């Protein structure tokens, strides 16, 4: 469990580094920019995009392939060379999202398995009239 937790933190750090790489490479104002959506509902950290706005206030989380984001890139005349570079950032972010979700899923299943084993041990202890599985 500790290994998975450590790997999840490392992937979070890599996602943050990828966002910082974008910010260090491209000057504001950005038509769109990557950000990390930390969502319990979606299984942890997710690499997503946001349109130009006020530091995330009132902005939607978008996939790079969304019509809204692609229309903004066209409307603002973002050069194809830049779009291709951003596409590569998106690919890297998508792989990090995949790795994060995979490990998070494994962590959740492992937690469930441990809880099931603990419940079995408690039942056995109850039936045996003692605490044979303490600690």
Image: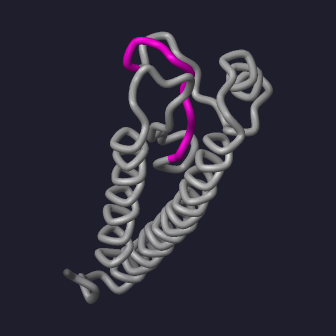
Q: Position of residue 37 (x, y in %)?
A: 47, 37
Q: Is residue 78 above or below residue 24?
A: above
Q: Nearer the viewer, residue 103 or 93?
A: 93
Q: Residue at x 30, y 70 (%)?
A: 6
Q: Nearer the viewer, residue 128 or 61?
A: 61
Number of marks present in the image shown = 0
Q: Which residues are magenta?
A: 46-55
Q: Is residue 65 above or below residue 121?
A: above
Q: Residue at x 73, y 16 (%)?
A: 75
Q: Residue at x 76, y 21 (%)?
A: 71
Q: Position of residue 135 (x, y in %)?
A: 19, 81
Which residue appears farthest toward the right when viewing the image?
A: 67
Q: Nearer the viewer, residue 125 or 76?
A: 76
Q: Is residue 89 left or right of residue 37?
A: right
Residue 128 drawn in magenta: no
Q: Position of residue 101 (x, y in %)?
A: 55, 60
Q: How is the image coloured?
A: one colour
Q: Main secondary structure of the magenta part?
A: strand
Q: Residue at x 46, y 68 (%)?
A: 107
Q: Report which quarter residue 78 is drawn in.
A: top right
Q: Report which quarter residue 9 is drawn in.
A: bottom left
Q: Position of residue 77 (x, y in %)?
A: 69, 22
In the picture, the quarter occupied by the N terminus is bottom left
């Amino acid at each position: 469990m500790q290994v998975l937790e450590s790997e999840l933190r490392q992937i979070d750090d890599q996602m943050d580094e990828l966002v910082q790489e974008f910010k260090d490479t491209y000057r504001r104002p950005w038509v769109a920019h990557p950000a990390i959506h930390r969502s319990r509902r979606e299984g942890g950290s997710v690499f997503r995009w946001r349109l130009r706005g006020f530091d995330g206030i009132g902005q939607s989380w978008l996939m790079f392939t969304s019509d809204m984001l692609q229309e903004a890139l066209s409307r603002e005349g973002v050069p194809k060379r830049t779009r291709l570079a951003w596409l590569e950032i998106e690919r890297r972010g998508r792989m990090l999202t995949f790795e994060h979700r995979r490990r998070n899923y494994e962590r959740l299943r492992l937690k469930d398995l441990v809880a099931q084993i603990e419940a079995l041990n408690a039942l056995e202890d109850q039936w045996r009239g003692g605490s044979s599985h303490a600690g």
